Amino acid sequence: MTDVFEVRRWDGAGRLGSLDVPRAGVTVETPALMPVVNPHLRTVSPARMEELGAQVLITNGYILYGSEDYREQALEEGLHSLYDFSGAIVTDSGSFQLSVYGDEEVDIDTEEILQFQYDIGSDIGTPVDIPTPPDAARERAEAELATTQERLELASELDLGEMLLNAPIQGSTYTDLRERAGADARATGADVFPVGAVVPLLNDYRYAEAVEVSLAAKRGLGPAAPVHLFGAGHPMMFALAAAAGCDLFDSAAYALYARDDRYLTVRSTEHLADLEYLPCSCPVCTEHGAEGLQALDDIERERRLAEHNLHVSFAEMRRVRQAIRAGDLLELVEARARSHPTVLDGYRALLDHADDLERTDDASKESFFHLSTESAHRPEVLRHHDRLAALPVEGDEVLLSEGGTNDSYDETWRVVPPFGPFPRALSETYPLTAEVPERTDRAAQAAAARGVTALVEANPDVAFTLAHWEWPDEVLATLPEAVTVTALGPDEDVDAETEVE
Ligand code: GUN
Ligand code: ZN
């Protein structure tokens, strides 16, 4: 099958892309949010969703298949008419519902359900995968994955016209299985790759593990494959998941939370009854205000809440896109990570793979803001450290300085935490143009020390002197013995004859 996905811009593993959906005759801009619609979720009309920015919806083929009321209508009119939506429509197979609600007796056949999805006009169809839950026994995860893979292979051999094919990636919480599943799914020639069975992780705020399984799947899939994070609908984690390289998200959350009188924000889930002020200026919130929204009758309140929830979700998705565009997606993730410790955990898990992120990062971004101790572990810092060993050092005696310079050295390099040393000629190149707080933190100093170490070890014949601002002893202790270390007092910086630029 030809590639339907094209990446236009990278920011770490995050990307702006376009997904061609030939059967719908549309190109979907990613990262994209796909609201979940089905005959039982009718709070916001698909036409209204389109106005809010939806280019693609997802619905459950299995629910329609089993519905006396809608099955025939779907077959006769097709999904686009049933939902009155002209964008792309994805159909799920229902395997997740079967696994969650434990209806083991119901046996859905991949060929039959895919044919049904095709017959109702689906643009992207899904085979019957087996969503092995997190923490399952390894033998079970392996056996179920083998069945899923057989079904993907079967599905890929069917003639389904222009309908694209989803190939869900399973493997429970075993990252090696997820990686293998990714490689095997990719080999089937399917088009879109949802990371499956993460809903239990997301519901329990296990974002670090959701990041780990997504990155593992992507190691197997390779960077060119479009990835859908199945069931990810809370806007507080969109930036994180996009930074892990997920391109498609689907949300029933907007409706499920509305049903429980819950109001979504990018940093939390609130009970409407607890809100005195609404932190949102969507039409729903400006029209009603907190009291007005609380006073609506049940049906209207649910409808309006669902619409607000979709508003914030689409707004966050646009913010994520713009962040990728501007090259500051990780700054956005850092902001979101400050809202909830579990998102922070997810961000830390992501940075454990900074080398993976670095591989696809755009090296010519515009700004780097050092905002937290985590910033010291960003891919840009790692890249600079890797590069240090190859930078030419001119002279036998070199000063690495956080402040002033001194003529008795052959050359003076600047030192800026978290990057460490660099020649002055590179001061105006990304990421060394970074904005770094003056009150630096220990993680940044430790990262700078790693940079010094990389430079010193690559140049054993050069005598280096490090002039630092009050780095603590435990950081200085990590430096190679060959470096002469001198603490730099504030006066020496201010009064230095030739100040470092
Ligand atoms: N919806 C949420 N998770 C899953 C999954 O793992 N598989 C399928 N088919 N649908 C899902
Ligand atoms: Zn609102």
Image (cartoon, grey):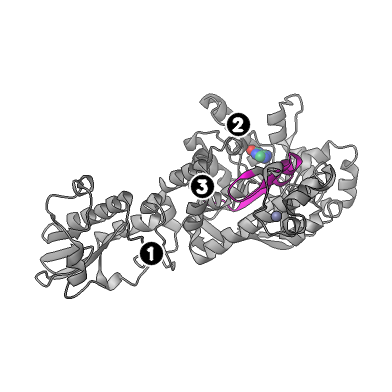
Mark 3, ligand 1, within 8 Å: the answer is no
The amino acid pointed to by label 2 is: Thr
Q: Residue 393: in sight, yes or no?
A: no
Q: Which residue is mark 3?
A: 218
Which mark is first along the chain, 1 or 3?
3
Residue 290's spot in the image, x, y percent?
72, 50
Q: Is residue 84 visible?
A: yes
What residue is at 53 percent from the left and 62 percent from the top? 323
* Label ID, residue 435: 1
Give the x, y percent position of residue 132: 60, 31
Residue at 78 percent across and 42 percent down: it is 61
**Amino acid carrying mark 1 in the image:** Glu
Residue where numbered disc 2 is placed? 132
Left or right of 46? Residue 447 is left
Q: Within 10 angstroms of label 1, few (less than 14), some, or many (20 or more) residues?
A: few
**Ligand 2 lies in quarter:** bottom right
Numbered disc 3: secondary structure: helix
Q: Which mark is residue 129?
A: none
The alpha-carbon separation of the residues under discs 2 and 1 comes to 44 Å
Disc 3 versus disc 1: nearer the observer: 1
Left or right of 360 on screen, residue 181: right
With respect to residue 142, does 85 lie above or below? below
Magenta region: 245-269
Alpha-carbon span between mark 2 and mark 3:
18 Å
Task: Count up the numbered dots.
Answer: 3
Residue situated in front as seen by the camera: 257 or 410: 257
SS of the residue under disc 2:
loop
